[in-house]
């Protein structure tokens, strides 16, 4: 009892000291907006000397968008600035932070953390953003009902961040936008919107800070539903390396739901034909009817499997959900400056976006325009994911209308080896790369952290994807490894406190 009281007292002291260190910033350009954040909470990133910031961008009254930023462990003063968004829609980017490529993972006790040696902040400053409002730790009024209405809010958040003294130094950095899953919608539209705003800034129409994205990364992205629904037939018939997923009778049902008159294919085509006319929301929104052909296809394809990893069943235990309990801990929340409970995948934002048929629309034209702009674009996918399987992703990019389409269609995939082991297959055409990552599910960095980090490193370096003899992390990156090894075998004071509460 005495020991518990000691830890509780120490925890409360730490919480109060961090609360006293809460910072605020009020924009001088946009009235009534700003930041509220905590610096160096000691949560998750425990590498000595590495700065972190977590808190809220106050977009408007009662519109608070959560972010968590980590400085690069190496060369932070010159490293790029990476924006990370998870998908959903309505799923938190804390998934990416804790399950995939962030500085730490949470242990099975739900209370302590272990450092991630393959964290992407080894080589890049990185910010994880929960959007739209209502996602993760974000809270307040959610006005987003589409990818197209989400983009202006994200732009506004970045403008406020870059105006602040805390983040102004990153205005001139190389900017990478990395996303996954519904990021197949978010990524192309966000970068397209940023480009449009940059042009308005350049011609003097609006004031602001240009946000020039030099590289776009999308893994297992939902880009073109017409093509990707059809891919469920192909993938269930034969998932390369894993075989037939469903019996012949089920495969016939799946095919019927897609090809029958008024079926999934016809519904999707009607959505595409409706484009942006006044009836498009009803036409496209009907595709998400749980009893409709498209949703029946998905249900049949994944039955008996974890939709995110065909090697597991519906009771999949990986990636673990330990981090979610960790973020539900009120002490953790106070330390990082979170003002609400954590909601990993929120129903509110999800249904607001789906009711307009947003997920039934294609982002392939926007993606093609970005590839034609000659910026680096990587579309990659784990090969054990079913829900956004790599066959469908590949078929989508092969259908993309851009200057390198014929070369892409006629160039075979080649092996990418890391330390002599085949980790992926890829094809490069100028600034565009498609890659299939072996033995990886929906969240590629969670399943294959070393391969994902090496792929990210090559994007950061501006290289075309290629094989390497020795992966970057194993060859001495990061140089602060001595500190990380010590921390890998221990836990932070904050984590110990959480364990005893």
Image (cartoon, grey):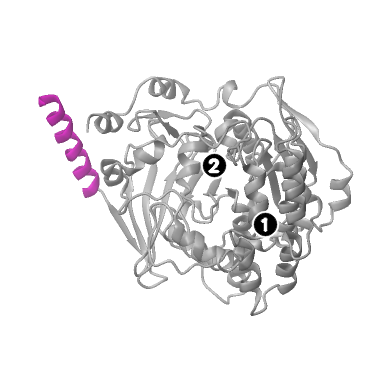
Tell me if residue 311 comes above or below residue 270 in the rendering: above
* CB within 8 Å, label 2 to label 1: no
- Outermost residue, bottom side: 278
Question: Which residue lies under the disc numbered 2?
Answer: 79
Q: Where is residue 327 in the image (x, y as percent from the top left)?
A: 35, 42
Q: Between residues 350 and 13, which one lies in front from this camera angle?
A: 350
Residue mark closest to the camera, 2 vs 1: 1
Whether residue 10 appears in magenta in the rendering, the answer is yes
Whether residue 335 appears in magenta in the rendering, the answer is no
User: Could you say whether the residue bearing mark 2 is in a helix, strand or loop?
Assistant: loop
Tell me if residue 372 comes above or below residue 332 in the rendering: below
Q: Which mark is residue 114?
A: none
Identify the magenta region.
1-20
* Left or right of 290, for residue 97: left
Q: Position of residue 261 (x, y in %)?
A: 78, 64
* Left or right of 266, for residue 4: left
User: Quadrant location of residue 40?
Assistant: top left
Q: Is residue 262 visible?
A: yes
Mark 2 / mark 1, whichever is N-terminal:
2
Q: Which residue is drawn at 70% across and 36% down?
A: 245
Q: Which residue is drawn at 65% across and 74% down?
A: 280
Question: Which residue lies under the disc numbered 1?
Answer: 294
Q: How far apart are marks 2 and 1 (CA)?
A: 43 Å
- Outermost residue, front side: 249
Count up the numbered dots: 2
User: Could you say whether the residue bearing mark 1 is in a helix, strand or loop?
Assistant: helix
Mainly helix, strand or loop, the magenta region?
helix
């Amino acid at each position: 009892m005495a020991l518990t009281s000691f830890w509780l007292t120490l925890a409360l002291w730490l919480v109060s000291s961090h609360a006293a260190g809460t910072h605020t910033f009020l924009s001088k350009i946009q009235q009534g907006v700003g930041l509220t954040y905590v610096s160096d909470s000691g949560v998750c990133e425990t590498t000595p000397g590495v700065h972190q910031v977590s808190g809220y961008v106050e977009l408007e009254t009662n519109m608070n968008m959560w972010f968590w930023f980590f400085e690069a462990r190496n060369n932070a003063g010159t490293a790029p600035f990476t924006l990370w968004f998870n998908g959903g829609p309505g799923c938190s980017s804390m998934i990416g932070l804790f399950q995939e490529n962030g500085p730490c993972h949470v242990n099975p006790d739900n209370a302590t953390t272990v450092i991630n040696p393959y964290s992407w902040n080894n080589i890049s400053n990185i910010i994880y953003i929960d959007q739209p409002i209502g996602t993760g730790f974000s809270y307040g009024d959610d006005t987003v009902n589409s990818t197209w209405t989400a983009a202006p809010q994200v732009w506004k958040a970045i403008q406020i961040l870059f105006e602040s003294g805390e983040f102004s130094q990153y205005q001139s950095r190389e900017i990478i936008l990395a996303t996954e899953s519904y990021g197949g919608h978010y990524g192309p539209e966000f970068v397209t919107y940023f480009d449009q705003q940059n042009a308005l800034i350049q011609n003097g129409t609006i004031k602001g800070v240009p946000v020039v994205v030099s590289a776009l990364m999308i893994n297992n992205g939902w880009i073109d539903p017409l093509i990707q629904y059809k891919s469920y037939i192909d993938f269930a018939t034969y998932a390369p390396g894993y075989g037939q997923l469903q019996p012949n009778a089920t495969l016939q049902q799946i095919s019927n739901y897609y090809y029958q008159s008024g079926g999934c294919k016809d519904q999707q085509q009607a959505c595409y034909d409706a484009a942006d006319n006044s009836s498009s929301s009803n036409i496209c929104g009907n595709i998400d009817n749980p009893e409709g052909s498209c949703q029946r296809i998905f249900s049949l394809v994944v039955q008996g499997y974890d939709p995110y990893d065909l090697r597991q069943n519906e009771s999949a235990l990986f990636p673990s959900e330990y981090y979610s309990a960790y973020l539900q801990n009120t002490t953790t929340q106070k330390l990082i400056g979170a003002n609400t409970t954590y909601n990993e995948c929120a129903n509110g934002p999800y249904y607001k976006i789906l009711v307009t048929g947003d997920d039934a629309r294609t982002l392939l034209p926007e993606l093609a325009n970005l590839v034609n702009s000659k910026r680096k674009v990587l579309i990659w996918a784990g090969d054990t994911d079913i829900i956004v399987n790599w066959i469908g992703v590949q078929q989508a990019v092969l259908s993309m209308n851009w200057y390198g389409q014929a070369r892409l269609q006629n160039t075979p995939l080649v092996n990418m080896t890391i330390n002599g082991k085949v980790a992926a297959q890829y094809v490069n055409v100028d600034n565009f790369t498609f890659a299939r990552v072996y033995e990886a599910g929906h969240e590629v960095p969670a399943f294959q952290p070393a391969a994902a980090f090496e792929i990210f490193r090559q994007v950061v370096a501006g290289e075309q994807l290629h094989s390497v003899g020795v992966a970057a992390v194993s060859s001495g990156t990061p140089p602060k490894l001595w500190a990380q090894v010590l921390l890998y075998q221990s836990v932070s004071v904050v984590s110990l406190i959480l364990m005893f509460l």
